Image: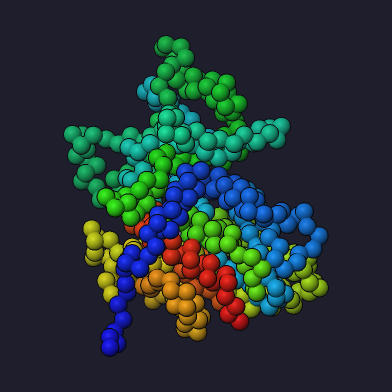
Amino acid sequence: MDLGYKNKNGWADADHSAVFDFAEGYKEFLNSGKSEREIVKEALRIAKNEGFVDITEKNELLPGDKIYSVNRNKGLMLAVMGKEPLRKGFNLVGAHVDSPRLDLKPNPLLEESGQALMKTHYYGGIKKYQWTTIPLMLSGVVIKKDGTKIDVSIGKDTDDFCFTISDILPHLAGDQMSRNLGNAIGGEDLTVLVGGIPLVEGDSQSVKKAILTILHDDYNIDEEEFLTAELEFTPAFPAKDVGFDKSFVGAYAQDDRVCAYAALQAILDINSPDKTAICLLVDKEEVGSMGVTGMKSKYFENMIADMIDMSDEYSELFVRHAFSNATCLSADVCAAFDPNFPSPFEKQNTPYAGCGISFMKYTGSRGKGGSSDATAELFASIVKIMDDNKICWQTGELGKVDGGGGGTIAQYTANLNMDTIDAGVPVLSMHSPFEVISKLDLYESYRAYRAFYQSNLK
Ligand code: MN
Ligand code: MN
């Protein structure tokens, strides 16, 4: 009898064809868009196809009803109403759909030495040197003075043109190579090449003028409209299988669209659960969850209040009870052990790619600072659901003690008095333009979220 614990690679027991099929839909989801707006649009399209209805079109909510609410085109809530009243609690899986990227500055366009360039301001935690010399695309929205909205998505298709940030050749990089990695590329160096043909020979601003002409003629955008626009450069390449055995997916923005997709697919499988099942896709996690579309917004509380009003007698106390009786999986990625960089990890307490969904009891940094620490009672009850459903799971910490740190939306959902634990997919090269996950972990996360939705913990 083996009394020890060892986390286990999940491939041996996995249904390989189910795992690989699931990853095909996932790659399509990633390729449907690069901005948080495009991903919300695609998630909504999928949910509507599966019968989810706009909550504003309903007068009352009955058990089994499937509804959605879009938050300012950058967040999405999906719910399947439970047989029990909402005040008895709900099962929430919350993921984020924003990812590190390069936002355009308000006044981005300039010409320098015959090149048209656009200035950017990076969003989220990036290693800046990783964002040069790769194909970039541009997406977002421009609102015209008359209120018309222009959806921008330039460079998404593989045969489209793209944009890029140049880097200095090694032959002349003596100065750059002597700096440390964090200073090799500065924030103001992330300036994107967007054109090079002058309108009129000899005019120093002629390339910029030519680009403004193209923007006006082809995209109906004038320079002044950049001031109020929301536009972002992201990697242009599509998601790809990685490895001879195609066991991994490499793509931009898998933090946290891998959990968002797993949570979305899980709720699509749910019909008339005991507890109301909710999938919440939020924005702004990468910059601290602030603002109207972040997890700190009142948006979600207001939606729960609305849903109680439409399914029960409304009372402020019922709203509070709904949260107190709720359970939340904060569905976010964690760092997978990287054999290329073993030293930041503590091997006995770190998640591994291919070993299933990873539960993180706490995140934070230093002495667990800034962490929501899930109770042992909650963790054990979730583990029971995993084991009852034969789901491959593991746990761990983010690196060595005092090695760094990070957080998720867990602390903000926990502040609403919901029992919360982090549960997501381990990622290699997190926050890089080409993050890597194991298809096994994606599939086990989907199965985990689905089993959680079907459970009745409290
Ligand atoms: Mn994340
Ligand atoms: Mn992140």
On screen, 242 above or below 118? Answer: below
Say which of 345 and 454 sits in front: 454
Q: Position of residue 173 (x, y in %)?
A: 22, 38
Say which of 330 and 110 sits in front: 330
On screen, 286 above or below 368? Answer: above
Query: How are the colours assigned in the image?
Result: rainbow
| Left or right position of 453 against 315 | left
The residue at 28%/71% (across/down) is 346
Looking at the rendering, in which quadrant would you find the C terminus?
bottom right
The residue at 37%/59% (across/down) is 16
Say which of 206 and 342 sits in front: 342
The residue at 57%/70% (across/down) is 453
The quarter of the displayed image where residue 248 is located: bottom left
Looking at this view, name the residue that lies furthest to the top: 201
Say which of 300 and 353 sits in front: 353
Q: Position of residue 178 (x, y in %)?
A: 20, 46
The residue at 32%/74% (across/down) is 7
Residue 438 appears in the figure = yes
Q: Position of residue 113 (x, y in %)?
A: 37, 23
On screen, 55 above or below 108? Answer: below
| Left or right position of 197 against 84 | left
The quarter of the displayed image where residue 149 is located: top right
Looking at the rendering, in which quadrant would you find the N terminus?
bottom left
